Amino acid sequence: MEELHIGKRIRDLRKKKGMSLAVLAEKSETSAGLISQIERNLVAPSVFIMYRIAQSLDIDISYFFNTETAYNLQRKGTHQVMSTNHGLNSHILLNSEQPGRPYDFLYLILKGGEHYKKDCIAHNGEECVYILSGTMHFIIDDEELVLNPGDSLHFNSTHPHLYLNKGKEDCESIWVISPRFF
């Protein structure tokens, strides 16, 4: 158990969230004494106790087993690529599959010369896009905006929105979408 530092992870996250031992104990239906012992690595918690603590801290239980370093490097050619709209869009996930990650960080390529139409979508969260090259036509709340290289747009995703490439040149952009979409 020591190599996973479960006790330290619980204590650090509990303190970061401003939660006392007593509050975590009450939320997780566990005694404060047991949580204190777990945090000091005096006892190893059962999976059931870890699950209840994780739920009380609003995290996935996999957080305790994540032994990744402070960074996650992805080399060229190793990124996850998702093709949508019959190959007209390529979403390249720039961040790795990290438990508890609150956002997607994407490189999006909209093919040029292929005008397509779909319905506007709306969902919880927010999005931010930065245009690298080409032109993106963005519709939000029935208003059409034309985004060019160097332009950025941040919006609440609960507003109906749609993005299109009406030009001949591919449009390349960087996106941050929260919460995770892909």
Image (cartoon, helix red, strand yellow):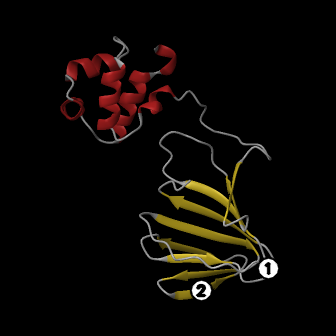
Percent coordinates x, y for residue 60 in the rendering = 42, 37
**Along the line of sight, the residue nearer the viewer: 2 or 77:** 77
Image-based side of 45 in relation to 70, left or right: left
Task: Indicate the quadrant where residue 112 lies.
Answer: bottom right
Q: Residue at x 73, y 64 (%)?
A: 87
SS class, disc 2:
strand
Residue at the extreme front = 86
Tell which tag, 2 or 1, sits nearer the viewer. Answer: 1
Residue at the extreme bottom = 143
Image-based side of 168 in relation to 138, left or right: right
User: Tag 1: residue type?
Assistant: Gly
User: Tag 2: residue type?
Assistant: Leu
- 181 relative to 51, above or below: below
Image-based side of 88 in relation to 65, left or right: right
Residue under pointer 2:
145
SS class, disc 1:
loop
**Along the line of sight, the residue nearer the viewer: 29 or 168:** 168
Q: Residues within 10 Å of mark 1 (few under 14, many from 20)?
A: few
Task: Indicate the quadrant where residue 86 lies.
Answer: bottom right
Residue under pointer 1:
113
Q: Residue at x 34, y 29 (%)?
A: 51
Q: Residue at x 76, y 83 (%)?
A: 167
